[in-house]
Image (tube, grey):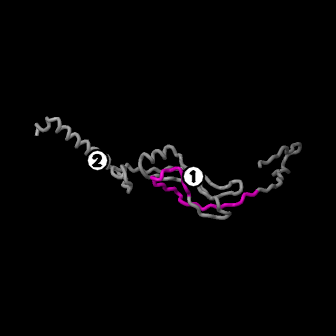
């Protein structure tokens, strides 16, 4: 046995087998088994899940004509997929979560929260999935304001109230 290990070709073969064994152990440790054809289907990629809190929600609607209520300011987004893609999206946060209200009339509607700018290979979960919104027409009216001073009869003689203002 010692004579075998003295030969350079035997050392090369053992080294190659150990390298292949090490590669297989690392590559198949945490796999994502997809039905894709290609490199990832044979060797897999590491799977990662990250939850991003306080992602702002954008409203798509003519805000000069309508007022919307019931849309949360922020949501929680969970990303699941390959570690490199999840980490890239999570650090840059270069995606949008929005609610599209175009084409809906006034009233109460249940609409889904949508997203854009996230790779299709990732699984995306938005919480809440749907929101109940109320859409009303924007209206303005003007009213006159009268300011009443409280306890005016308790002001001592020689004093008076001046420069009373209101905002708005």
Residue 156 placement: quadrant: top right
Task: Residue under label 2, please give it.
Answer: 25
Query: In the displayed structure, does residue 18 sit left or right of residue 74?
Result: left
The residue positioned farthest toward the front in the image shown: 37
Q: Position of residue 53 (x, y in %)?
A: 52, 50
Q: Position of residue 108 (x, y in %)?
A: 64, 64
* Mark 1 lies on residue: 74
Q: Is residue 58 magenta?
A: no
Classify residue 61 by image quadrant: bottom right
Question: Relative to residue 95, is residue 105 drawn left or right?
Answer: right
Q: Which region is colored magenta?
A: 113-139
Task: Give the x, y percent position of residue 82.
Answer: 41, 49
Which SS class for mark 1?
Answer: strand
The image quadrant where one finds the N terminus is top left
Between 42 and 91, the residue placed more toward the observer is 42
Q: What residue lies at 47% left-to-right and 52% top-to-bottom?
A: 79
Residue at image point 81% right, 55% down:
143
Q: Position of residue 56 (x, y in %)?
A: 57, 50
* Residues at marks 1 and 2 touching, judged by CB atoms closer than 8 Å: no
In the depicted structure, whether residue 162 falls above or below residue 78: above
């Amino acid at each position: 046995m010692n004579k075998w290990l003295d030969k350079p070709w035997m050392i090369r073969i053992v080294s190659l087998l150990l390298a292949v064994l090490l590669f297989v152990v690392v590559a198949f440790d945490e796999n994502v088994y997809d039905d894709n054809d290609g490199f990832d289907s044979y060797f897999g990629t590491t799977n990662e899940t990250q939850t991003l809190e306080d992602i702002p929600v954008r409203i798509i609607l003519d805000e000069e004509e309508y007022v919307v209520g019931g849309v949360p300011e922020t949501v929680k987004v969970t990303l699941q997929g390959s570690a490199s893609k999840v980490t890239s999206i999570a650090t840059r946060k270069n995606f949008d979560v929005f609610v599209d209200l175009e084409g809906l009339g006034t009233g109460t509607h249940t609409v889904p929260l949508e997203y854009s700018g996230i790779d299709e290979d990732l699984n995306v979960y938005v919480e809440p999935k749907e929101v109940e919104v109320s859409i009303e027409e924007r209206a303005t009216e003007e009213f006159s304001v009268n300011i009443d001073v409280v306890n005016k009869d308790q002001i001592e003689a020689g004093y008076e109230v001046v420069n009373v203002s209101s905002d708005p």
